[in-house]
Image: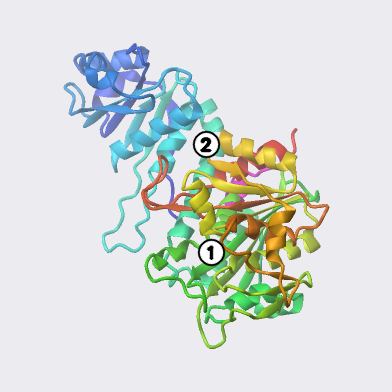
């Protein structure tokens, strides 16, 4: 797994600033006032900081942006970075400041002078997240992320406060690595093997093979993968930090590559379908984070791993398959395969674990991208309280999410002439009818959220906190939801 930059917190010692190499960062308020550490750095740098903050260049910066001073006199550092942030910035501005530092420093070590910054952990987390680079398949070996050192008056307190953020960064990086992997590397077998590595953190991991799935009656899931040489699997991950209490169930769509099957996708852009396992990748990252920080909650993660390929054995449009629940599905479009994977795994999770709540995540529909773009995931739910709690968690972590409707009128669009339902309802309201399909596999007593993450799992132009490619969206929001709603308090 790609490792986030090493972050250490040390006691403030301004006497050694002249010898520090790499990048030195300090915070400057919007009015240009310098704190004690910045004033000391200014003296060592022959007044360079004071001149910089009085310039139009600094005045024109927005909160969270950085002014770079190259090769300042009196310092061994190649750069001094002035981060324009007031003492109590918003969480997003603080993380933006950290991300700006990560882009500026490149592979150089970074020393952050904490001063009186109240959002220090968010700044450092922003720097750690934006410092991600996926270089596993480049001939030139990627340069490891350089260390981040933070000078603060209370290093032990800052270290303890950052522990949860460090766990989130690791979970996000795991998700990004999985989503960025090409499908000839991340086969269903390789994916399952990587998830078994979570056992090192205390997660109980079980892999259900095709014979097991046949016995369970997961016919809709197996139908999706029957045209592939890669065996279909379901991986079950259990974190029992809350003891024997009813767990939260996280369900992930893990289509390691989606050609569309017999309903073949257009060639243009098909290479992006390596990310169609983004839901399963997010579940993996969330489970890593919860175990890494030893969350006092019981959470189970279940992912359906399949490959959707055209073959002489592949399912065809017009086929009728029976789900584990017992309902029959007329397959109108084999490219609407994710819901066929999820419905069996969701039913199995409810039968086996009787969860307190269930959340499924999937790169499910192009329709959600048309509706919400790349700024928000689509949120569908049968439970207002659970949905509101998730939306708050998403807002608190800066991960965009927007609630979408469900309703009987949309449900009627799934009516089939020959089976209990069709797997699509036509072009109108495509993301909603997909959610309506999944809701048919949610038991009445189960609070449930469906997250359509097709627009946010991987972004070609990158985001404020991630370079181009996989974003790791959802890991931090799910972790925050568990902390706020499902974790036991002392």
> Up-down: is 24 above or below 471?
above
> Up-down: is 68 above or below 410?
above
Q: Residue at x 50, y 70 (%)?
A: 258
What residue range appears in magenta?
287-295
Q: Which residue is mark 2?
A: 398
**Nearer mark to the viewer, of 1 and 2:** 2
**Distance from Cα at disc 1 to Cα at disc 2:** 28 Å
Q: Is residue 395 magenta?
A: no
Q: Residues within 10 Å of mark 2 (few under 14, many from 20)?
A: some
* SS class, disc 2: loop
Q: Residue at x 56, y 32 (%)?
A: 160
Picture colour scheme = rainbow
Q: Position of residue 50 (x, y in %)?
A: 24, 13
Q: Is residue 240 visible?
A: no
Q: Residue at x 49, y 69 (%)?
A: 257
Q: Which residue is mark 1?
A: 194
Q: Position of residue 482 (x, y in %)?
A: 67, 42
Q: Quadrant of the C terminus?
A: top right
Looking at the image, the residue that sits furthest to the bottom is: 312
On the image, which quarter does residue 216 sit in? bottom right
Q: Is residue 225 visible?
A: yes
- Classified by dominant secondary structure, the portion drawn in magenta counts as helix
Q: Is residue 352 left or right of residue 193?
A: right
Q: Residue at x 24, y 23 (%)?
A: 18
| Circle number at residue 444 | none
């Amino acid at each position: 797994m790609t490792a986030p930059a090493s972050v250490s917190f040390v006691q403030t010692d301004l006497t050694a600033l002249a010898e520090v190499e790499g990048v030195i960062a300090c915070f400057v308020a919007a009015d240009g006032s310098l704190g004690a550490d910045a004033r000391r750095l200014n003296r060592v740098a022959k007044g360079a900081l004071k001149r910089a903050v009085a310039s139009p260049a600094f005045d024109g910066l927005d909160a969270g942006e950085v002014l770079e001073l190259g090769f300042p006199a009196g310092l061994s550092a190649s750069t001094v970075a002035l981060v324009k942030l007031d003492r109590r910035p918003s969480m997003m501005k603080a993380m933006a400041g950290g991300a700006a530092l990560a882009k500026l420093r490149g592979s150089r070590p970074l020393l952050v002078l904490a001063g009186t910054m109240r959002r220090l952990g968010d700044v450092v987390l922003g720097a750690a997240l934006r410092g991600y680079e996926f270089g596993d398949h480049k001939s030139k070996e990627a340069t490891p992320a350089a260390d981040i050192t933070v000078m603060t008056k209370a290093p032990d307190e800052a270290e303890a406060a950052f522990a949860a953020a460090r766990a989130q960064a690791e979970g996000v990086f795991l998700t990004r690595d999985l989503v960025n992997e090409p499908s000839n590397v991340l086969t269903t077998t390789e994916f399952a093997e990587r998830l078994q590595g979570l056992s090192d953190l205390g997660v109980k991991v079980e892999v259900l093979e095709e014979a097991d799935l046949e016995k369970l009656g997961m016919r809709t899931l197996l139908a999706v993968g029957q045209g592939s040489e890669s065996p279909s699997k379901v991986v079950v991950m259990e974190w029992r930090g809350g003891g024997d209490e009813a767990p939260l169930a996280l369900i992930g769509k893990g289509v390691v590559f989606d050609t569309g099957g017999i309903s073949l996708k257009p060639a243009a852009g098909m290479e992006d379908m390596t990310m169609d396992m983004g839901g399963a990748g997010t579940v993996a990252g969330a489970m890593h984070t919860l175990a890494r920080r030893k969350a006092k909650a019981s959470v189970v993660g279940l992912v359906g791993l399949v490959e959707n390929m055209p073959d002489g054995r592949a399912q065809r449009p017009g086929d009728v398959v029976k789900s584990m629940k017992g309902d029959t599905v007329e397959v109108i479009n084999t490219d609407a395969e994710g819901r066929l994977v999820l419905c069996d795994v969701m039913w199995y999770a409810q039968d086996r674990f009787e969860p307190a709540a269930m959340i499924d995540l999937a790169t499910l529909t192009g329709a959600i991208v048309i509706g919400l773009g790349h700024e928000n995931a689509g949120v569908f739910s049968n439970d207002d309280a659970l949905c509101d709690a998730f939306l708050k968690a998403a807002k608190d972590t800066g991960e965009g999410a927007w609630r979408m409707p469900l309703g009987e009128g949309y449900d009627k669009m799934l009516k089939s002439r020959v089976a209990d339902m069709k797997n699509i309802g036509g072009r109108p309201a495509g993301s909603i009818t997909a959610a309506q399909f999944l809701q048919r596999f949610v038991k009445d007593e189960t609070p449930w959220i469906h997250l359509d993450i097709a627009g946010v799992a991987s972004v070609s132009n990158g985001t404020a906190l991630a370079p181009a490619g996989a974003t790791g969206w959802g890991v931090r929001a799910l972790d925050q939801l568990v902390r706020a709603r499902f974790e036991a308090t002392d």
